[in-house]
Amino acid sequence: MKRTAIYPGSFDPLTNGHLDVIQRAAKLFDRVVVAVAVNESKHPLFTLAERVALVNKAVAHLPNVETDSFNGLLVEYAEARKAGTIVRGLRAVSDFEFEFQLALMNRKLDENIETIFMMPKDTYTFLSSRIVKEIARLGGNVSSFVPPNVQVALKKKLKV
Ligand code: ADP
């Protein structure tokens, strides 16, 4: 049986921290599906199609990683994709409380799906999509924080 993991998130946009988690998960599972959440309520900078395309290009070198999008309940999406595991990233203690709540809620909704947490390389623990967007907006260099295609897309989107 093939083991599939879902790595869900807004990915607005994908950062090197996300990519680090994806690469680690790809070593543990037969298939990793990076699932971009619609999340309209978060007013994303990039459209869903743009976020999916950015992830897709950045993971092209990883043969067992694919990109998809989803709307609605994550556990239902995971069931539909026949994935038994949800992967989430933990950067610092500050992530823990929310992630803990989310994982236990997902377990309440579906006992069969486990959540696992992965820690990124230490140099990525301070990275978030929000901070990357802020730096890019102010004209800062984000080349060490995001993959090259995301850097280009940020420049274009923010006209900096
Ligand atoms: P969400 O809106 O669901 O939090 P994000 O795209 O911000 O979506 O993050 C998706 C997942 O990746 C979350 O589990 C988040 O904690 C994790 N993550 C975000 N940035 C990093 C990073 N720099 N290193 C490791 N994990 C990260």
Image: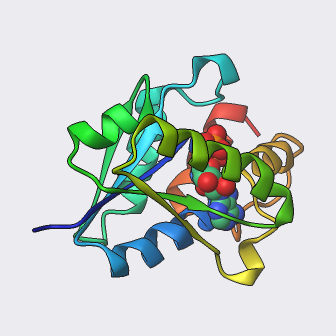
Specify the quadrant that holds the C terminus.
top right
Q: Is residue 139 left or right of residue 70?
A: right
32 relative to 99, above or below: below
Residue 127 location, quadrant? bottom right
| Residue extending furthest toward the top | 41
Q: Is residue 156 left or right of residue 36?
A: right
Where residue 34 sits in the image (x, y, percent)?
39, 51
38 relative to 110, above or below: above
Check the image and tell me how it is coloured: rainbow
Q: Residue at x 50, y 39 (%)?
A: 108
Specify the quadrant that holds the N terminus.
bottom left
| Residue extending furthest toward the right | 138
Where residue 92 sits in the image (x, y, percent)?
81, 67
- Is residue 28 among what the camera can see? yes
Where residue 153 sits in the image (x, y, percent)?
57, 43
Q: Residue at x 38, y 30 (%)?
A: 70
| 130 or 71: nearer the viewer | 71
Q: Is residue 56 left or right of residue 8?
A: left
- Is residue 151 among what the camera can see? no
Q: Residue at x 41, y 24 (%)?
A: 71
Residue 69 location, quadrant? top left
Residue 125 location, quadrant? bottom right
How many numbered marks does the figure carry?
0
Where residue 131 sits in the image (x, y, percent)?
82, 50
